[in-house]
Image (cartoon, rainbow, N blue to C red):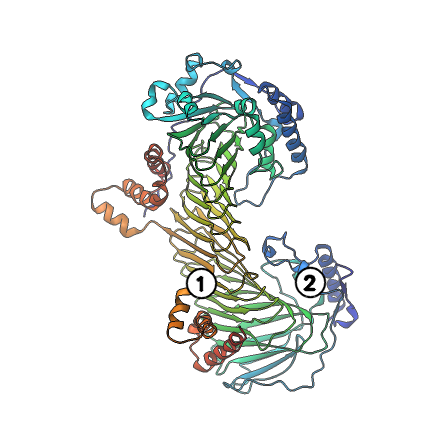
Amino acid sequence: MEQLFNIDFKKINSSNDKEAVDRKKNFELFLKGGLPNKKNENWKFSDLNYIISKNFKNITNNDDYKFNEKIESIHDFDHNKVIIVNGSLKSYDLHFEEKEKVKIETLKSLEGFHHQSKNNLDYLNKALSIGGFNLEVQQNYKCKKPIIIYNYFSANLNNKIINNSNKIKVSQNSELTLIEYNICEKSKFFKNTFEKINIDKGGVLKNIILQKTKCNGYFYKNISGTQNYNSSYQNFILSSGLKFNKIEIDMILEKEKSSCHILSGLNLSKEEHQEIKTQINHLAPNCKSYQKIKNVLENDSKGVYQGKIFVKDIAQKTDAYQLSKALILNDQAEFNAKPELEIYADDVKCSHGSSSGSIDEEAIHYLMTRGIKLSAAKKLLIKGFLNEIFDNIPEEKIKNFLEKSVAVQIDEIR
Amino acid sequence: MKKEEYKNQEYKYGFTTEIENFKAPKGLSETTIRFISKVKKEPKWMLDWRLKAFNRLKVLKEPNWQKPKYPKINYQDLYYYSAPKSMKDKPKSLDEVDPKLIETYSKLGIPLNEQKRLSGVAVDAVFDSVSVATTFKGELDKKGIIFCPISEAIQKHPDLVKKYLGSVIPISDHYFATLNSAVFTDGSFVYIPPNTRCPMELSTYFRINASETGQFERTLIIADKGSYVSYLEGCTAPMRDENQLHAANVELVALDDAEIKYSTVQNWYPGDKDGVGGIYNFVTKRGACRGRNSKISWTQVETGSAITWKYPSCILQGDNSVGEFYSIAITNNHQKADTGTKMIHLGKNTKSKIISKGISAGQADNTYRGLVDIGAKAKNSRNYTQCDSLLMGNKCGAHTVPYIKNKNSSSTIEHEATTSKINEDQLFYCNQRGLNQEEAVSLIVNGFCKEVLQQLPMEFAVEAQKLVSISLEGSVG
């Protein structure tokens, strides 16, 4: 591990001496345990240690945040813009919103960043985090337009590691749609992000994660959050095109009537490995959670879904659902799932389903008898399979945009 | 539903039998193993095999990933061999068997006595560490079927034992399997010759009687080409306030076109209502479908034991082979179960089906843990899994931990799981028609388990149905 990581602490700014000492301590803790490997139950299907060691020989930290190009914006719908370059907040434009209602700034300190799920990447993040953003929506304010975070990664990031941490707070009765749009140049790097979400009473957060183009990035993202009374969290994951991507979501439904939706539609192709790991903790009665994970696996790609629903004994009337479906298009592709239930309350409705297999031959036959070519028929069915994810997005323009970006990916399928 | 104080259901088989026992020295050591081997008059290769396992055991660590946790077992404080004294010189016929033993088995309702041949089940009864008697030998011999204690098979059929023992569960498999390989005392051995359909159900009855003993039996069933056998297994133990360890190994081998049906009704002593005592049932069961078109079907009704921790598995090696697993696991009071199956698809066109029903009441914890692994070469394979859990009260838990791996595009895996409580409407409907709460629950639960119960052979199905009702008695108020 020490040979693999060649870290220069001088490149990282620490706000005070204590922080600098803490960073070194955390880094030592990380080196002791190393990158998670398949012996760790949570990493059983994605051996990060193997993947990183195989693809990286010498990893250094990045200190270049220069940015002179122009990012091509999305024109499909009006939105606020936040630009992040190599993990660091560069600029923002929130002109659609009222002043002082939505605040964004660089995250200054990692204090209060206690993660619900511990792993060694947490130490690594705490040691090397360059900050990130701190986003807050004030009480009783419903954002007029979505915020798009243009997450730009420059071309000179080869063999670099980026660690950042973000905080998102949605206050009482406020609403926010946050779109994370990753744009990568062709460089091979490793990104390790920890994100903390707090949704207060009656708050609504819609979070969409997607990838502009294919990229050589190795991403890990840990999202942990708490939800108050009657709050809602909806996460749409469409970020395919990375070499490795693991998104870990740990949500705590602390108070009654909160709901959590996680929907994911992924289309993985050559040498891609993607894992979605979720843990939804129902700690209060009358909460709802819904998860739908859809994977299309081509070539030698590997899709993994590990989901867990935990229901505490007092969390009666819980309604929790988990569904994972995979279309395996090639014999080299692989799908692994571990949909888990841990239930201690009796008056609940909890179920999960998982299926994996190839495209329905009969449906193909049906389409072909109507004059549609095999490849077109396949694409049509895949499109239908993935587009189901967007049913929960009411905004027509955003939906169309997402459908369009998925269609681009599907067209690449041969 | 009103929740009352949970009553404890009297454990029917909790009596002990005062029989003088002949025991091995306490503790796990090479001496104990040599002692067991000597008492069993085993050939040298068998002793070597045991010692090899013992050496391996020294390196292995006890697994700890399971959901139910238990206090550390002191392996040096156990007797590894205990036999009724009268068995030391093996009786030649049933008449010579200690009448007390016969009495014990008749109390258990086991048709040991050949007079009860009407029941038509060939029985091999294992009492503590030795096999007591095997019935219907003559009839089976005629067909060339070997059904005898494994200790006898080691002496009389060494070639078969050598060839298959440890071929499904290797001696270095995991801690408890290796422990069993080192110290197993007895168990059943079944060999069905080619193209033979076993004319009757074969059955083994296990009973732990002596205190401070562990029971380590080993069962090996081989179904040669084109044969069929249905095997039943039943277990009970006396009520004692200590925890007793039961670590058995069961190996099944099905060759071309052969079929093995293995049914278990496990009713070891579950401990009292406060969770004192009871059996730790840590069993390794595995079947290999070696041949083409072979089939192995596991059916289990798990109502007893303080902790049940077992995963009857199928390795589907032969093309077109089929694996099935039907399970009912009922936990009440402080019982804990972590059970399920593994279906490992290696051959082409292999199929597997898993139906698991878990019921928890009282403060019990019930976990389904399973693996479905379809390998890259297992083209056109299929799996269907359904695991349903029923919860009674909010002090118990139901958990589902399936592992699903699919490595090729022509195979399909389907998995479904639900967790719920007994439907109030159904209860109301039954009450309205004059059934009391308990009868209604029993009826609904039996309906919930029906898919599994109907897989059991006739003799067992009736008993199992009663057992399901009894196990839950007092769990609803």
Q: CA distance from mark 1 to mark 2?
A: 33 Å
Residue B293 visible (yes or no): yes
Q: Which mark is residue A289?
A: 1
The percent coordinates of residue B49 (x first, y second) are 63, 29
Chain of the residue under the numbered disc 2 shown in the image: A
Residue at the front extreme? B195
Residue B295, image x and y in percent?
A: 44, 42
**What type is the residue that disc 1 sits on?**
Ser
Q: Position of residue B12 (x, y in %)?
A: 38, 28
Quadrant in which the C terminus of chain B is drawn: top left
Residue located 59% across and 77% down the image: A213
Q: Which mark is residue B384?
A: none
Q: Specify whether disc 1 shares its chain with disc 2.
A: yes
Q: Earlier in the sequence, mark 1 or mark 2?
A: 2
Left or right, residue B261 beside residue B281: left
Q: Chain of mark 1?
A: A
| Residue in the image at 38% along x and 52% along y | B420
Query: How many circles with numbers are drawn on the protein?
Result: 2
Whole-percent x, y for residue A47 in the image: 64, 58
| Residue A60 drawn above or below residue B185 | below
Snapshot quadrant of residue B300: top left
Q: Is residue A398 left or right of residue B474?
A: right
- Amino acid type, mark 2: Ile
List the residue tagged with mark 2.
Answer: A52
Q: Are marks 1 and 2 in contact (CB under 8 Å)?
A: no
Secondary structure beneath label 2: helix
Q: Nearer the viewer, residue A309 or B47?
A: B47
> Is residue A32 positioned above or below A77 on the image?
above
Query: What residue is drawn where x is 63% and y is 38%?
Result: B172
The kind of secondary structure element at disc 1 is: strand
